[in-house]
Image (cartoon, rainbow, N blue to C red):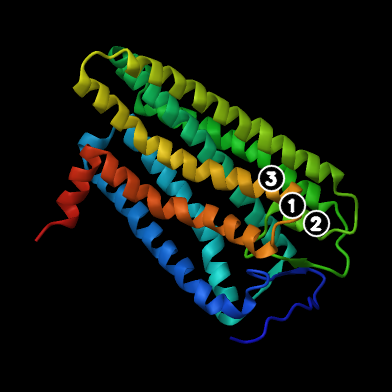
Amino acid sequence: MAGVNLTPSDPRTFILTGISGLESAHEWISIPFSISYIIGLLGNFMLLFVVGKEQTLHKPMYLLICMLALTDIAMSTFVVPKALCLFWFSLNGITVGGCLTQMFFLHTVSIMQSAILVIMAFDRYVAICSPLRYSTILTNAQIAKLGLVGLIKAVLFTLPMPLLLSRLPFCAKRIIPNTYCEHMAVAKMSCGDITVNKMYGLVITFLVIGLDLTLIALSYGLIIRAVLGISSKKAHQKALNTCIAHIFVMLMYYLPGLFSNLTHRFGQGIAPHIHIILNNLYLLVPPMLNPIIYGVKTKELRDKVGKYTCRS
């Protein structure tokens, strides 16, 4: 692999280092990157295809799964192709405008994913705690409206980030120790005061993610209470099975995301390559595993996927 040039000659360009400290292993690191990306694309497009083709799956829960699949595709596509160009061809330059655009879309999709997970938790709460009213409370149109609200919220919360960054002066050092442009990584390159950027990043983390996690915990707390009150063992097991897939998915999104966010601000003792790898796992692992989890744990979806994949 050609040596990585870390001297930005154009003041309108930032330099992405990739996995700092592991530059010599970039070609090997690109293998799991590309495999995860391809598996994620194939799995999520398969979900979209199957749900789109099967009228029986045109229900709120599967509409939410499709919305999550779209955000998964977008999230990984915003990062992986550029990262692979860096790993394979040492194309590590990115314009300031391109960097801010990538950052805006990544953070918007991330907040949108969190909103979808909240709606999924509410969907399961209504399905288990008020099953007779489910079809009137949650329709496809209602889910679409909630998704639109989530998208508007994501755009409004993310928009100040590139605006705050664009006012900062960037001096000689324009090197981003990552494979993509992340808000705080870009802010730390500035030779100006980034206190407002730090505060805004923390507000977003605790206000958006913290509030969403609280709503999800509340929903599942009520679900668990309702499930424990079910006398039928079969109904008890069925109710739990409908929630397990969602809980796995939520853990995959929130745990690495929160850990990455907090270590970026408070984890000075953590090796840089560990932090960067965690950042990228957050973008690669959920899109790859979500279709597998839903395909295995959701019987109706599993049967329909099998109908198309097992044709002779």
Q: Nearer the viewer, residue 276 or 60?
A: 276
Residue beneath label 2, please?
188
Q: CA distance from mark 1 to mark 3?
A: 11 Å
Which residue is pictured at 46% across the width and 20% down the height? Answer: 221
In the displayed orientation, state which residue is furthest to the right. Answer: 192
Residue 234 position, x and y percent, is 19, 23
Residue beneath label 1, please?
184
Residue 157 position, x and y percent, is 67, 37
Amino acid under disc 2: Lys
Which residue is pictured at 57% across the width and 68% down the height? Answer: 82
The reply to whether residue 108 is in sight is: no
Amino acid under disc 3: Leu
Which residue is pictured at 54% across the width and 52% down the height? Answer: 282
Is there a contact, CB below 8 Å, between mark 1 and mark 2? yes
- Which of disc 2 and disc 3 is earlier in sequence? 2
Tell me the SS state at disc 2: loop
Tell me the SS state at disc 3: helix
In this rendering, is residue 89 above or below 298?
Answer: below
Residue beneath label 3, please?
262
Q: Nearer the viewer, residue 111 or 293?
A: 293
Quarter assignment of residue 178: bottom right
Q: CA distance from mark 1 to mark 2?
A: 6 Å
